C-alpha cells in the first residue's frame, strides 16, 4: 500500500491549486456567478492549457491520465476553490461517453474537448426519473436512415453552452430496463430541440430540454443501438468520484474558513475560538474530513476494477460524504454566525456547492439504498 | 392532565378556520405555500385584514386592543394560520416593541405609537446587532450624545430585518461610555426619515434581500423618543427578548412544513413508486413527526405554565433549540424530496415573478429555504448561547 500521489499527480495538484488560488478569487468567482453564461470562457481556456482537461482522459483517448486518482486529484482542487466551470459535464460525462462509444469520426470531438474548444452536456435524467439512472422514457425511432427523438430531459447541466448534447433515448425494452438505451450526439441548434435555461443555486446553469420529433441521421448514434448502458454507468461512476472529491475539497475550505474565523472573531472579550463548545465542533469537522478523504480514496481506487466493487465503494463514499458534507456545511455556517449567511462571503458559495452536490446522481439516502442492494447482490 | 381540547377551544378553532377561509386572499396563501416573498404591500394588506378582525395583536393586553387569548388559544390561532398558509405577522412592532412600550413607555408614547403599529402607519425594525456586537450584544458601540433637546446618534447597526420597508427603528445605543457595559445602554425610537440615516442592503446566500445595514451619521433624535430612563435600556432590551422568544418553537411552521414535505413526497416518484413509500425517506418523515408531536406538547406545557404565572426561563431556551432543530430538519427533508429539482435557483419563486417555476409544484423554493433557514439557529440568541443559558442556570457555569 502507498497513499502518496505519484509525482505527476502531485505536480498537477500543485499547479492547479496555485492557478486557482491566484486567479479564481472570491470576487472573480462571484462575477462569474452573476454572469449570463454562468462560467468563464477565459478560465476554461486556461484550465485546458494547464492540462486539467487532458488529465481526465487516458492516453489512448488523447489525454495523459483518466484514472480514478487523476479525477479525484483534479476535482478536489476544483472543489477547494468552488469552481463552477463545467468540467464534470463537458469532460467526464460528455467527453467520457464519446471516448467510450464513439467511432473515429466522433472521437475527433474528444481532442477538441481536451483542447478546450468544445462544450458538451449529457441529457439523460428526465422529469420523473429522479436518481434512477436506467429510467429512460424518451424514445428514439428509426425512419429510413433517420432517427427521431421525442421526450423531455430534466436539469441538463451546461446545456445552453454545449455545442453538442449527448441525449439518451430508448430504442427498445421496458421503461427502466438497462438494455435498449442508446445515445445520440445532437448539435444544440438541431431543429425540434428547445431549451429553457436557468441558473443553478450553487452556480452554473442548466436547462429543461424538450425533444419534439428531433430528426438526426443514423450516424448520430454513439455505439450500438440499445447498448449504451454500460458506458453510461461507467461515466456516471467517474462523475460520482469527481463529485465526492469536489465535495471533499469544498469541505476542507469550509472548515479552514471556520477555523480561521474562530481565531479572529471576538465576542465577550475573547476570540470565540477559545470557547471549548466551538473548539469541539471544529474538531468534529476535522474528524469527518479525514473519513471523507478515505471515502474518496476507496472510491477512486476501485474505479477501474470490478463493477460491483466499484459501485459499492462509490455508494459508500457518496453516502458518507452526503452526511459529512451536510454537517460541515451547516456547522461552518453556524459557527460563523450571521456573516456566513451573506451571499458575498466565500463560505456561502462553498456551503451551497457541498449541499447541492448531493442532488446529482443521488443523495445520501439513495446511495445508502444502492449500497444495501449491492451488498445483498 | 387532559390532552383533549375543550368544547370552547374547538369552537374557537372553528371560528379561526372560518375566518381564514373567508378572509385570507388566495394569491397570498399561494405565495406563502410556494415560498414566495410578499413584499411590503402584501404584509400591510394581511395586517389590515387581521386588524379589522381585531386579531392583529393577540399578545397585547386587552386595554391596548389585544385579544386576551390564553396560551392554548394563541397556539390554536398560530396552528390554523400556518395550516392555511397565512403570512406570518411581522413581529418587530407588534410583538417586540409594543410590549416594551406597554410596560416601560410613557402614556404619550403609548398613545402615539401603539395605534400606528396597528394601523400599519409605522413599520418598525429592530436595531440591536452591530458588526462587533452579535452574541455579545452588550458590547454595542452606536453612541447617542445628549445635546439640548436631542440625542446625536452615530454608529452602525446590521442584520436589520426588513429595514428596507421600515420607517421607524428601535435602537439600543450607548449613552454612558464610562459605565459597565450593560449599564450605559439606552433604548431609542428613531424615525428613519431623519437626515443622516442610510440603509444598505445585504443579500443573503439564497439571493434574497431580507436584511440590511443601517448607518447613522449625526442623526438628531428628540429626547422624548427615549423609552423609560436613560442608561436603563438593557433591562428593556432583555424584556423584549423574552417576548421575541414567544412562539420561538415555531410548532405551526413545522407542522405546515411537514405537511408540505408529505405532499411533495406523495407526488415525487422514486423507482416508479411515490417517494413517500420509500422506507428511507418515510423513516425521516416519521422521525420528524415523532419529534414534532412531542414538541407540540412541550410547547403547550411551557407556555401554559407561563400563562399561569410561572415565568418561562431556561424552558424558552429549550424551545428555541429544539424547535429550530426540527424546523431545519424539515427544510432538509424538503430539499431531499425535490431530488434533482432542488438544484435550480428559483429567483422567480423566491422574489415573486411571472415565469412559471422550474420543476414540479412545491420544489422551486425548497433549497433556497433550506439555506435561508440556517438563520433560525443563529438569530434570536444563537443555539449555542441558548445552551449556555441552560447550562448557567442548571450547572452554575458561565454564560
Ligand atoms: C475500561 C477502562 C480501562 C482503562 N485502562 C487504563 C489503563 O490501562 N491505564 C491507565 O492509565 N488508565 C486507564 N483508564 C483510565 C482512563 O485513562 C481514565 O478513565 C480517563 O483518563 C478519564 O479519566 P476519569 O475517568 O478520571 O474521568 P475524568 O477525567 O474525571 O472525566 C470525566 C468526564 O469529563 C470529561 N472531561 C474531563 N476533562 C475535560 C476537559 N478539559 N474538557 C472537556 N471535558 C473534559 C471527560 O471526557 C469525561 O467525560 C481506563 C479507564 C477505563 C474506563
Ligand atoms: C437573517 C438574520 C436576520 C437578523 N435580523 C436581525 C434584526 O432584525 N435585528 C437585529 O438586531 N439583529 C438581527 N440579526 C442578528 C442576530 O441576532 C445575530 O446574527 C446573532 O446575535 C449572532 O451574532 P453574530 O452573527 O455576530 O455571531 P457571533 O456572535 O459572532 O457568533 C459566532 C458563533 O459563535 C458562537 N458563540 C458566540 N459566543 C459564544 C459563547 N459565549 N459560547 C459559545 N458559542 C458562542 C455563536 O453561537 C455562533 O455560532 C439577524 C441575523 C440574521 C442571520
Image (cartoon, coloured by chain):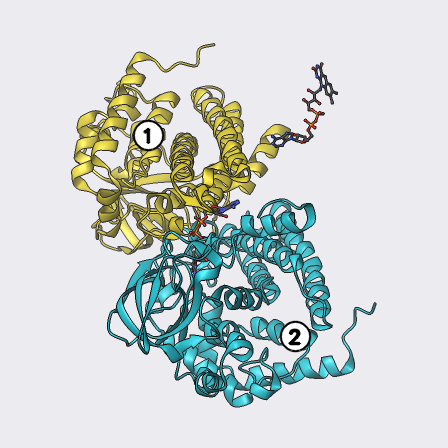
Chain colours: A yellow, B cyan
Say whether mark 1 and mark 2 are on the same chain: no
Residue reaching furthest to the bottom = B52
- Out of B102 and B90, give the one closest to the viewer: B102
Q: Are marks 2 and 1 in contact (CB under 8 Å)?
A: no
B283 over B15 or under it: above or below: above
User: Which percent across, then down, holds residue B168?
Assistant: 37, 75
Q: Quadrant of the C terminus of chain A?
A: top right
Identify the residue at image location x=51%, y=40%.
A327
A4 over B3 or under it: above or below: above
User: Which percent across, then down, holds residue B147?
Assistant: 30, 72
**Residue B280 seen in this snapshot:** yes
Identify the mark at residue B76; answer none if there is no mark: 2
Q: Mark 1 Cα within 10 Å, few/some/many (few <14, many 20+)?
A: many
Identify the residue under disc 1: A77
- Out of A308 and B199, give the one closest to the viewer: B199
Residue reaching furthest to the right = B1
User: Which percent across, then down, holds residue B217?
Assistant: 25, 65
In the figure, residue B28 lies in which quadrant?
bottom left
B353 left or right of B48? left
**Residue A152 seen in this snapshot:** no
Q: CA distance from mark 2 to mark 1?
A: 52 Å
Q: Nearer the viewer, mark 2 or mark 1?
A: 2
Q: What is the count of numbered marks?
A: 2
A28 left or right of A371? left
Q: Label 2 is found on which chain of the structure?
A: B
Q: Label 1 is found on which chain of the structure?
A: A
Q: Label 2's element? A: helix
B380 over A239 or under it: above or below: below
Residue reaching furthest to the top = A1
- Out of B56 and B7, give the one closest to the viewer: B56
User: Which percent across, then down, holds residue B221?
Assistant: 32, 75
Mark 2, ligand 2, within 8 Å: the answer is no
Amino acid at each position: 500500500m502507498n497513499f502518496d500521489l505519484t509525482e505527476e499527480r502531485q505536480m498537477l495538484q500543485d499547479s492547479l491549486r496555485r492557478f486557482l488560488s491566484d486567479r479564481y478569487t472570491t470576487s472573480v468567482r462571484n462575477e462569474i456567478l452573476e454572469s449570463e453564461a454562468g462560467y468563464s470562457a477565459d478560465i476554461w481556456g486556461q484550465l485546458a492549457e494547464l492540462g486539467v482537461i487532458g488529465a481526465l482522459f487516458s492516453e489512448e483517448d488523447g489525454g495523459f491520465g483518466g484514472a480514478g486518482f487523476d479525477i479525484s486529484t483534479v476535482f478536489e482542487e476544483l472543489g477547494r476553490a468552488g469552481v463552477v466551470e463545467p468540467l464534470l459535464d463537458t469532460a467526464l460525462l460528455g467527453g467520457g461517453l464519446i471516448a467510450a462509444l464513439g467511432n473515429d469520426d466522433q472521437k475527433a470531438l474528444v481532442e477538441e474537448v481536451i483542447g478546450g474548444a468544445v462544450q458538451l452536456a449529457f441529457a439523460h435524467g428526465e422529469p420523473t426519473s429522479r436518481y434512477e439512472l436506467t429510467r429512460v422514457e424518451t424514445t428514439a425511432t428509426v425512419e429510413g436512415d433517420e432517427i427521431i427523438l421525442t421526450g423531455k430531459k430534466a436539469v441538463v447541466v451546461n446545456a445552453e453552452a454545449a455545442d453538442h448534447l449527448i441525449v439518451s433515448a430508448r430504442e427498445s425494452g421496458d421503461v427502466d430496463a438497462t438494455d435498449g438505451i442508446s445515445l445520440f450526439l445532437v448539435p444544440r441548434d438541431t431543429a425540434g430541440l428547445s431549451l429553457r435555461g436557468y441558473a443553478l443555486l450553487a452556480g452554473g446553469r442548466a436547462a429543461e430540454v424538450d425533444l419534439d420529433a428531433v430528426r438526426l441521421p443514423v450516424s448520430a448514434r454513439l455505439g450500438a443501438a440499445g447498448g449504451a448502458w454500460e458506458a453510461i454507468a461507467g461515466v456516471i461512476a467517474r462523475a460520482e468520484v469527481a463529485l465526492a472529491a469536489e465535495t471533499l475539497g469544498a469541505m476542507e475550505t469550509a472548515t479552514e474558513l471556520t477555523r480561521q474565523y474562530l481565531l479572529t472573531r471576538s465576542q465577550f472579550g475573547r476570540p470565540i475560538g477559545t470557547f471549548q463548545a466551538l473548539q469541539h465542533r471544529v474538531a468534529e469537522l476535522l474528524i469527518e474530513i479525514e473519513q471523507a478523504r478515505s471515502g474518496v480514496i476507496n472510491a477512486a481506487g476501485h474505479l477501474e476494477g470490478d463493477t460491483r466493487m466499484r459501485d459499492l465503494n462509490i455508494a459508500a463514499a457518496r453516502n458518507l460524504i452526503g452526511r459529512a458534507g451536510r454537517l460541515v456545511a451547516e456547522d461552518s455556517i453556524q459557527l460563523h454566525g450571521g456573516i456566513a449567511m451573506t451571499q458575498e462571503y466565500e463560505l456561502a458559495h462553498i456551503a451551497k456547492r457541498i449541499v447541492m452536490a448531493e442532488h446529482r446522481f443521488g443523495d445520501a439516502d439513495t446511495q445508502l439504498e444502492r449500497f444495501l442492494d449491492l451488498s445483498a447482490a | 392532565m387532559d390532552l383533549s381540547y375543550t368544547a370552547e377551544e374547538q369552537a374557537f378553532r372553528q371560528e379561526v378556520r372560518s375566518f381564514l377561509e373567508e378572509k385570507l386572499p388566495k394569491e397570498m396563501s399561494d405565495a406563502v405555500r410556494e415560498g414566495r416573498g410578499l413584499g411590503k404591500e402584501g404584509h400591510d394588506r394581511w395586517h389590515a385584514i387581521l386588524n379589522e378582525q381585531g386579531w392583529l395583536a393577540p399578545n397585547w393586553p386587552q386595554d391596548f386592543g389585544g385579544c386576551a387569548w390564553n396560551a392554548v388559544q394563541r397556539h390554536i390561532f398560530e396552528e390554523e394560520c400556518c395550516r392555511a398558509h397565512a403570512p406570518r405577522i411581522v413581529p418587530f412592532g407588534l410583538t417586540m416593541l409594543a410590549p416594551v412600550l406597554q410596560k416601560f413607555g410613557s402614556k404619550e408614547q403609548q398613545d402615539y405609537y401603539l395605534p400606528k403599529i396597528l394601523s400599519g402607519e409605522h413599520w418598525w425594525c429592530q436595531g440591536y446587532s452591530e458588526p462587533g456586537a452579535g452574541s455579545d450584544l452588550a458590547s454595542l458601540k452606536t453612541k447617542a450624545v445628549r445635546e439640548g433637546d436631542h440625542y446625536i446618534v452615530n454608529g452602525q447597526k446590521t442584520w436589520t430585518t426588513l429595514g428596507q420597508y421600515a420607517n421607524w427603528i428601535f435602537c439600543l445605543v450607548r449613552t454612558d461610555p464610562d459605565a459597565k457595559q450593560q449599564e450605559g445602554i439606552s433604548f431609542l425610537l428613531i424615525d428613519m426619515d431623519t437626515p443622516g440615516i442610510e440603509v444598505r442592503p445585504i443579500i443573503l446566500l439564497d439571493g434574497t434581500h431580507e436584511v440590511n445595514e443601517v448607518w447613522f451619521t449625526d442623526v438628531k433624535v428628540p429626547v422624548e423618543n427615549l423609552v423609560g430612563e436613560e442608561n436603563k435600556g438593557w433591562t428593556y432590551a432583555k424584556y423584549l427578548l423574552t417576548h421575541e422568544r414567544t412562539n420561538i418553537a415555531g410548532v405551526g411552521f413545522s407542522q405546515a412544513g411537514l405537511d408540505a414535505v408529505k405532499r411533495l413526497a406523495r407526488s415525487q416518484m422514486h423507482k416508479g413508486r411515490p417517494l413517500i413509500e420509500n422506507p428511507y425517506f418515510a423513516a425521516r418523515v416519521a422521525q420528524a413527526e415523532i419529534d414534532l408531536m412531542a414538541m407540540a406538547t412541550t410547547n403547550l406545557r411551557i407556555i401554559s405554565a407561563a400563562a399561569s404565572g410561572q415565568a418561562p426561563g431556561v424552558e424558552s431556551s429549550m424551545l428555541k433549540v429544539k424547535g429550530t432543530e426540527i424546523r431545519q430538519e424539515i427544510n432538509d427533508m424538503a430539499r431531499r424530496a425535490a431530488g434533482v429539482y432542488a438544484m435550480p435557483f428559483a429567483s422567480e419563486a423566491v422574489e415573486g415573478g411571472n415565469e412559471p417555476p422550474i420543476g414540479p409544484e412545491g420544489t422551486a423554493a425548497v433549497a433556497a429555504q433550506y439555506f435561508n433557514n440556517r438563520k433560525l439557529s443563529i438569530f434570536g440568541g444563537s443555539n449555542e448561547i441558548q445552551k449556555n443559558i441552560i447550562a448557567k442556570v442548571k450547572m452554575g457555569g458561565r454564560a
